[in-house]
Image: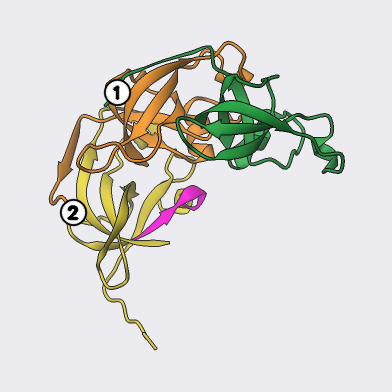
Amino acid sequence: MLLARIIGTVVATRKDPRLEGKKLLICRLVDPDGNDEKGYLVAVDTVHAGFREQVLLVQGSSARMAYGCKDTPVDAAIVGIVDQISQDNG
Amino acid sequence: MYLGRVVGRVVCSIKDDALHAKTLLLVRRLPNGPVVVAVDSVGAGAGETVYVCRGKEASFAFKGEEVPTEATVVAIVDSVESVQI
Amino acid sequence: MIIARVIGNVVATQKDESHEGKKILLVQQLDLEGNPLGDPFVALDAVDAGVGDRVLAVQEGFSAMTSVGHTDAPIDAAVIGVIDVIDLVELA
């Protein structure tokens, strides 16, 4: 799973019919301290995440285990909104 | 999948049984990528432009066989028309 | 999924049978500013996208295969949406 921050949305009218009704959000990957990392993903929202929120992402075939994503062409899904991260930096 | 050029072949006498009688090609990712070993499924040869399927799906090029490959040449490219961005 | 631009068409006569009758596209991933990111890749088309279109692409087997109507086929990438609008709240 990955940590990310929601920074935008994508709208596509012509798309695979199984994506209809799904919200596509642009996610910038972040480290546990909230700093931006390289890369972004377009992910399907399954938890009603909003702009600037920090979220939990699943990638690959596991993304289809997220709510409502069974048998859909989804390779990245947002499955949680992060409240807090605690770290022990040794 | 990605475009590649066949730059050579690899011969192994000792290999997994499922790779028996399969051609192993050396393919350079275009334009300037690394060279990988890919199993041939279409009869490609040296110098040809091809495209390569990678990952688990690569083994699906051999129907009904469980071939241990993570890169398979699945097409010989006749032409590419592309624009620069 | 990633944001990408269709930059070309690939013609191949000799190919896996699951690719027959499909449009084979050369696709370039874009960063959020719209600049090219990494090397172009080859994807099958599921939504009748054309050169110049900004698209959504998947690079995962099941998603790619089923979007063009196959299972157990050597397809690892597909174009599954044509993007109308990208709305960014910040350019990070």
Q: To which quarter of the image does residue C47 belong?
A: top left
* Res. A43 in view: yes
Disc 1: host chain: B
Q: Which chain is yellow?
A: A
Quadrant of the frame with the C terminus of chain B: top left
Question: What is the chain identity of the residue bearing mark 2?
Answer: C
The secondary element bearing badge 2 is classed as loop
Colour chosen for chain C: orange
User: Rounded to the nearest whole Å, what is the CA distance between mark 2 and mark 1?
Assistant: 25 Å
What's drawn in magenta, residue-wise?
Answer: A56-62
Q: Amino acid at mark 2?
A: Ala
In the foreground, B16 or C44: B16
Instruction: Tell me the shade of chain B.
Output: green
Question: Quarter of the image holding residue B63?
Answer: top right
Residue in view at x 45 percent, y 30 percent: B31
The residue under label 1 is: B84
Q: Nearer the viewer, residue A77 or B25?
A: B25
Is residue A57 magenta-colored? yes
Q: What number of labels is visible? A: 2
Q: Which numbered dot is residue C92?
A: 2
For the residue labelled by badge 1, is the local secondary structure a helix, a strand or a loop?
A: loop
Place of residue C68 in the rendered image (x, y in percent of width and height, measured from the top left): 49, 25
- Residue A22 in picture, x, y percent from top left: 31, 42
Who's the residue at 28% across and 52% down the image? A27
Q: Within 10 Å of the Cα at label 1, are there few (<14), some (14-19), or many (20+) other Cα atoms?
A: few
Horizontally, is C78 left or right of B4 in the view? Answer: left
**Residue under the point 26% across and 47% down:** A25
Classify residue C83 as left or right of residue B74.
left
- Residue C40 to residue A47: above or below: above
